[in-house]
Image: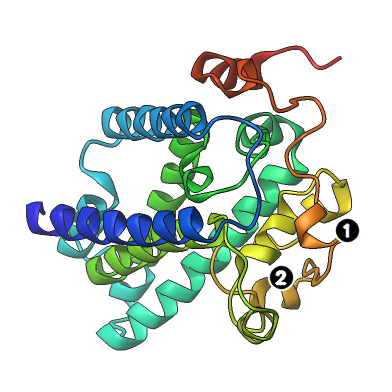
Amino acid sequence: MADNTALRLTLFLSVFAIMAIAEYCFPARLAKIQRSIRWRTNFLMMISGALLAKIVVPIGLVGIAFWVNEQQLGLMNITNATTIFSVITCLLLLDILIYWQHRLFHTMPILWRLHKVHHADSHVDTTSGLRFHPVEILLSLLVKAFAIITLGVPVIAVIIFEVLLNAFAIFNHANIRLPKAVDTFLSYIIITQRLHRIHHSQRVNETNSNYGFSVSWWDRIFGSFLSEANQPDENLTLGLKAYPATENNSRLLTLLKIPFKKIK
């Protein structure tokens, strides 16, 4: 377990460092809020979510996967599926699950109250991929835990999925712009930074698109893929109109209170 945690942390920090350096050297857009303010708040949001998750599910998803496979629970164990089949199938099913979870957080008002904390960021960069309300982090953790128990997801599949989930969250939020030809090619396979910025647009029809966190297949299959925004990428208005780019709207306490404020 300790080796697994160290590996995941090393990969997370490596991807974060690479993307942070890339966006510092070649920024696609300029932020309206000072980097130190945004980064401090976004990291504190991540830490808050991690602490809440650790309190509620102390053994974590990998620990749950170990227990499930020791007890031979879940579909993959009941059917005696091969390891390779189990890993590939579970990775695809977990990916679809996160796609629909994300889409549900946009369509159900009570869940949107939580998720709009993420979208209230007026600028999108590597730390935006860490900025989720602790309660949303907890709900997502419980959904994934249920899937692991139900499917009997192999431990290695959980580790791979969590590493990819974190890596792609940092990658597609990065404040960079790929060459047009490269972006166009990659968009047939994955959600690029440009495609994900469309998802962070203030226009509702654009926000309700490109839900995938990694591959773009599910958006294409389920009709939520949007290849172009109403405005060019460099002029795209990001965030939420209700939360303009001010220092107060970038403070931790303000963000934590967003889901519980009365809707005008």
| Residue 241, quarter of picture | top right
Q: Is residue 184 above or below residue 251?
A: below
The amino acid sitting under disc 1 is Gln
**How many numbered callouts?**
2
Residue lying farthest left?
2
**Residue 231 badge:** 1
The amino acid sitting under disc 2 is Asp
Residue at the image point whose x is 26% and y is 83% from the top? 83
Could you say where residue 23 lies in the image, as x and y percent from the top left? 50, 57
Label 2 crowd (10 A; few <14 / some 14-19 / many >=20): some
Alpha-carbon distance for marks 2 and 1? 20 Å
Looking at the image, residue 100 sits to the left or right of residue 127; the answer is: right
Task: Label 1, secondary structure: give it.
Answer: loop
Looking at the image, residue 52 sits to the left or right of residue 93; the answer is: left
For the N terminus, the quadrant is bottom left
Q: Is residue 100 above or below residue 179?
A: above
Residue at the image point whose x is 84% and y is 62% from the top? 232
Looking at the image, residue 181 sits to the left or right of residue 13; the answer is: right
Looking at the image, residue 175 sits to the left or right of residue 200; the answer is: left
Residue 46 in view, yes or no: yes
**Residue 194 badge:** none
Toward the viewer: 102 or 45? Answer: 45
For the rendered model, the colour scheme is rainbow
Could you say where residue 236 lies in the image, as x and y percent from the top left? 80, 52
Could you say where residue 96 lies in the image, as x and y percent from the top left? 57, 67
**Residue beneath disc 2:** 219
Label 1 crowd (10 A; few <14 / some 14-19 / many >=20): few
Toward the viewer: 222 or 175? Answer: 175
Could you say where residue 117 lies in the image, as x and y percent from the top left? 62, 31
